[in-house]
Image (cartoon, rainbow, N blue to C red):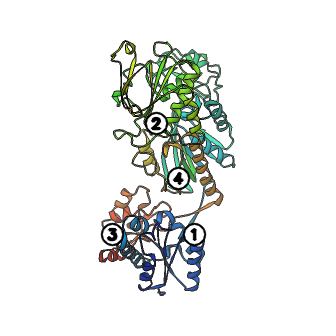
Amino acid sequence: MAEVRIGVYVCHCGTNIAGTVDVEEVARYAKQLPSVVIARDYMFMCSDPGQALIKSDIKEFSLNRVVVASCSPRMHEPTFQRACQDAGLNPYLYEQANIREQCSWVHEGDEATQKAKALVEAAIRRVSHHEPLEIKEIPVNPNTLIIGGGIAGIQAALDIADSEHRVYLVEREPSIGGHMSQFDKTFPTLDCAACILTPKMTAVGQHPYIDLFTYSEVEEVSGYIGDFKVKIRKKARYVDEERCTGCGVCQEKCPWKTDSEFDIGLGKRKAIYFPFPQAVPMVPVIDREHCAYFLKGTCRACERFCEAKAINFEQTDQILELEVGAIIVATGYDLMDPTPITQYGYGRFDNVITSLQFERVVDCVGPTGGKILLKDGTQPKSIAIIHCVGSRDQNYHTYCSRVCCEYALKFSHLIKEEIPDADVYQMYIDMRCFGKGYEEFYDRLSHEGVNFIRGKVAKVTDEAVTDEERGRLVVIVEDTLLPGVIRVPVDMVILCAAIEPRSDAEEVAKLLKINRSIEGFFMERHPKLEPVSTPTEGIFIVGCCQGPKDIPDSVAQALGGASKVLSLISRGKVSLLAATAKVDEMRCHGCGRCEEICEFHAPKVINKNGVMVSEINEALCQGCGLCAVTCPAEAISIRHFTQEEIKSMVDVLTES
């Protein structure tokens, strides 16, 4: 076995580390440890000169192991592994000691320096046991699956398809468009939402490289980066998409109505319906739960009047199997149901509505034809807009939903545009206008006669104290600028409800084996450096499924996700994780516990020469170690995380 020759590099990280840790002393300490050939300290090891220093020393001192003491491995381990690889050293002969997050940021004085020494020595001991691992490459299927057809999914699909690569876009609703299709105008420019969105929807429906599956859901995902196998359930519309001309006669002649999901219960739709006038595809769907034929075996009016003979009551769900190399998740968000916040009266008072319902009210194709009307059909003379309903609230969601301040300001403008003499009240905690042109939009609204009340709303009630309040809603709010509780009588209340993860987020996370944050949104690999990647290689997240954001940020993230996929496709191959599980067949009993516990389906018990043993599919294995700790026979270990390596580190740290 070759002599172990280790190079140690201690990073100052500006003053992030050096401000607390005596880095020169740590380097001197490392130099006298066994097998250490060279030890240096440098201001910024991740910089080009810092990496060049490592490369030069590997060649000059014949180093066969490298340790860098710096920040978290999550941030720069790949950087230093590439530097080693460029110098001809196997990247798995590298080890990183975290003396920033785990040391300088949490300790002071001599204590920090002593801990840094211990962490560096532990890394040196561990790297002595490292072995070079083989890095395998596999081809990448150039097809892409995108789950979710809102603006983020649409943008990502168009970007990838425009490069002439096949995209499968799956949307659970009958049409693509997502929440943006429900909006009237977009802030801060007040552009017509449909005017922006509809051309993109049409482009998706007509694109030769996009296969659109609406009214469909992904049921199963297996495989790994470059080679995912996907099963999609295409639900029966009971309308033949090939024959349907989108004429709308079936919808017109259908006698049965129910509440419209698109109008959030404010309007009605038929039992056979188009979700909205600009739907893509322009093919209706029959709602079994409200169709008289499925309920009673009668009617069939849509079938009688359809000249194209497109109605097919015998249609069944289809299961489609696809193969793709990458997956983009763009499943969007739900608007919080404010019913549990009983003090605001949603669901009890007719004219307390959510922000999304108001979007439908002011839309020219909405339930009131764009007219702002109360439940009794009259025009309101005063409207209160309550911010942070369920956001920034310890009882519901502690995070800021980001878009509420801006769309609340937009509502003020739309109200003033239609009802110039209306009294409009913005009731807010803080006005957060963070985006390009947003502060200017706020300034514009402040000159349009809108009343701004800074304070938390305590209650919305119909209990009148004065004649002015009788027959109206009264908003009780604490005004923090003019201290005191005030009562504001209004005709309508709009609740800016929180953006929250979709109700099926947990189910989707399990299906795709991706993580969720404490708030329930899908979790990115790194919030700054990898905002669209996930720990599962080949799966990316874009738009509001990753966290609350506005349309420009959703589109920007979609572009980022598309660029990640195109980068993967252009390479044509991908390197597999080398630090995977391995099985000692002499110890394995073939019990199958590893197969049961693995979320990635990597282990499989097979009959090998008459003996049942576990075999690891290295392409599927993510090196999480769950199988290793579960195996009762201790037959499984993880490459690069062997017992020797871990124990050597623990020994140093327990002795320190």
Quick one: label 1 or label 3, which is nearer the N terminus?
1
Badge 1 density bin: few <14, some 14–19, many ≥20, Cα 10 Å: few
In depth, the one of 369 and 640 nearer the eye is 369
Q: Nearer the viewer, residue 426 or 129?
A: 426
| CA separation in Å, label 3 and label 4 | 37 Å
Q: Earlier in the sequence, mark 4 or mark 1?
A: 1
Q: Which residue is mark 2?
A: 334
Q: Distance between the Cα atoms at labels 4 and 2?
A: 21 Å
Q: Secondary structure at mark 4?
A: loop
Judging by the rendered image, the residue that carries numbered circle 3 is 634
Whole-angstrom CA distance, mark 4 to mark 1, is: 22 Å
Quadrant in the picture for residue 352: top left
Q: Which mark is residue 47?
A: 1
Looking at the image, residue 287 lies above or below residue 588? above
- Local SS, label 1: loop
Residue 454 in picture, x, y percent from top left: 43, 33
Examine the rendering and report whether any part of residue 25 can be seen: yes
